[in-house]
Amino acid sequence: MAETVTGAPRLRRALSLWDLVLYGVIVIQPTAPMSVFGVLSDRGRGHVATTILIAMVAMLFTAISYGRMARAYPSAGSAFTYVGQEINPALGYVTGWSMVMDYMLNPMICVIWISQQAHVFAPAVPYWGWAALVALVFTWLNVLGVRTSARINAGLAAAMGVVIVAFFVAAARTIFGGAHDGVAFFTRPFYDPATFKTGAVLGGTSIAVLTYIGFDGISTLSEEAENPRRNILLATVLTCVAIGLLSAVEVYLAQLLWPAAQPFPDETTAFEYAAGRAWGPLLGIVGFTLVVANFGSGMGAQLGAARLLFGMGRSNALPKGFFGAIEPKRRIPRNNVLFVGVFAGLGALVIRDFGLGAELLNFGALIAFMGVNLAALMRYYVRQREKKLANLVPPVIGFLVCLLLWLNLSRTAQIAGAAWMLAGIAFGAWKTRGFRSELVDFSLPAEEES
């Protein structure tokens, strides 16, 4: 059990259950499956909705593990804290280091994607100008404080919701107003006997699972959540279910509008073409909406990254004077917000490769997911006198699913990710003089009600 330190800096508890759900939905993006719709349709042989729903069930097991561990340790450290407390401090440090890569790259790839799209719309402004501007706006909004971020999240969710509803209405009008071959037309996106292959659907599911990456960011806000022992678990599970069901409906309608047998003009913008078939203006509107979605996701990811760095800084895994500091007026880890903003801006100028950034993000995220599942298994099953099946099955399944996905990452991502991990281990060895001194201090601040 961690020692409680009453004099440690504290964050302000300001986020309700629905604030947490909105944060999770924005970080994952309610438009999450749109950008990978074409790839999923190709890999899954048209069974996009099926892959999304299977992936939702799979990720719910990891979501449950996150929620249970947040109930035990309502700390901003997330997986870093859970693994360090339940398994081993050194493994917690390694998990935290992998999460740093994940969380730092998330806002960076959002800056890359938005800047590339903005440069297409307004080529007079160079790419580097857009990258600097987007990173600056992300940082400025997060420096304003967590309450402001919550209000921005609500506004972005509402804006994306309007576009999604417009797509639903236009799609329904087109689908029901056109000719089709009866019930089979409506069931084919879920199961088409002519094209269904288990291997293809599972291959598509391995990609569809990535649609949900980001829900773990909710646990980094545990110290700013009202009643975290209850709300973090509920928010994590509700976010996965909400995104899963919404995503399934989106891709289901898109598949009805553009059957899998018809090739897309461009696989990466397949959803936009399907939406345009329902209503012409949606082709451009959906494209703009994806820019908005990435804006909200990047801003939310920067918020989560700042809290993760704060947890690691306070625990002495990173230099405490900088990363463990709290700005007294707004009571936010301002140094970390600024640090992540600078990293995202500079990284977007150096890398510019959205695909590579996404692969590297998945490398770190899946390591963290596996660690949290193992931590939940240790705490709620291995160390308990009464061995309940309900405490064994979710973390085991969650771990195996994440391991399978991690093993199927590209070779480039594996090599680059391994290099990052080696750098982290080297830093830990230097910091502890060959691991001869304490690597991490897991003392947590006392909980407060408001």
Image: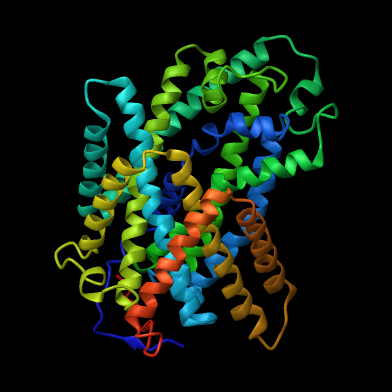
Of residues 55 and 323, the one nearer the viewer is 323
Residue at figure coordinates x 49%, y 72% from the top left:
71
Residue at figure coordinates x 67%, y 22% from the top left:
256
- The spot of residue 142 in percent (x, y) is 25, 51
Observer able to see residue 227:
no
Observer able to see residue 47:
yes
Rendering quarter of residue 331: bottom left
Rendering quarter of residue 319: bottom left
Of residues 337 and 100, the one nearer the viewer is 100
Total marks placed: 0
Q: Is residue 28 above or below residue 389?
A: above
Q: Is residue 425 above or below residue 30?
A: below
**Colour setting:** rainbow
Q: Is residue 360 above or below residue 51?
A: below
- The spot of residue 16 in percent (x, y) is 38, 58
- The spot of residue 270 in percent (x, y) is 56, 24
Residue at figure coordinates x 28%, y 55% from the top left:
340
Image quarter (top left, top right, bottom left or bottom right) of the C terminus = bottom left
- The spot of residue 424 in percent (x, y) is 40, 69
Rendering quarter of residue 401: bottom right
Residue at figure coordinates x 46%, y 81% from the top left:
89
Q: Is residue 314 left or right of residue 199?
A: left
Determine the residue located farthest toward the left in the rendered image.
329
Q: Is residue 121 above or below residue 425?
A: above
Q: Is residue 242 left or right of residue 149?
A: right
